Image (cartoon, rainbow, N blue to C red):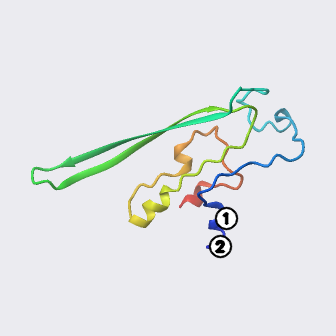
Amino acid sequence: MEDVLPQYITQQGHKLEIGGPRPPATVTNAVSWRSEGIKYRKNEVFMDVIESVNLLVNASGSVLRSEIVGNIKLRVVLSGMPELRLGLNDKVLFEITGREKAPSLSSLFPSQLILTPGYSPADEG
């Protein structure tokens, strides 16, 4: 297991190598909610991470309750049906520091999103 993780968790980008011709999306019906032939002048992905810190302190200065609530908003302007890989590695930090309520990928994204083949919410354990 230790040898496998460094292959997938990196600080480097990933460029998709385009191979041979692919069948049209209508054949596989992989995503019925996206129209065929979408084209943009520039391919862009905008991500806004909005965090809110809530803290409750008593009169002596002791922290009674604290939480960080986050929201991720995406604006995706991509032509065709490219593969987009998004990695969020903060869960490892939560587990190391012993924090509770670490986010899972399945809770962050809508059900229409196609996650990596072989992905299972059970793997997030």
Vertical placement of 27 versus 57: above or below? above
| Residue under the point 54% across and 52% down | 88
| Residue under the point 72% across and 52% down | 117
Vertical placement of 98 versus 87: above or below? below
**Amino acid type at mark 2:** Asp
> Where is residue 125 shown, x and y percent of the image?
53, 61
Quadrant of the image for the N terminus? bottom right
> Where is residue 44 shown, x and y percent of the image?
64, 34
Q: Nearer the viewer, residue 73 or 125?
A: 73
Left or right: where 68 falls relative to 57: right
Q: Quadrant of residue 6?
A: bottom right
Q: Badge 2: few (under 14), some or many (20 or more) residues near its Cα, within 10 Å? A: few
> Where is residue 33 shown, x and y percent of the image?
70, 30
Assess whether mark 2 and mark 1 are in contact (beta carbons under 8 angstroms). Answer: yes
Total tally of numbered discs in the picture: 2
Vertical placement of 68 versus 5: above or below? above
> Where is residue 8 shown, x and y percent of the image?
65, 61
Measure the alpha-carbon separation of dots 1 and 2.
Answer: 8 Å
User: Can you identify the residue that label 1 sits on?
Assistant: 7
Q: Quadrant of residue 123?
A: bottom right
**Amino acid type at mark 1:** Gln
Q: Nearer the viewer, residue 90 or 101?
A: 90
| Residue under the point 55% across and 49% down | 105
Secondary structure type for disc 2: loop
User: Can you identify the residue that label 2 sits on?
Assistant: 3
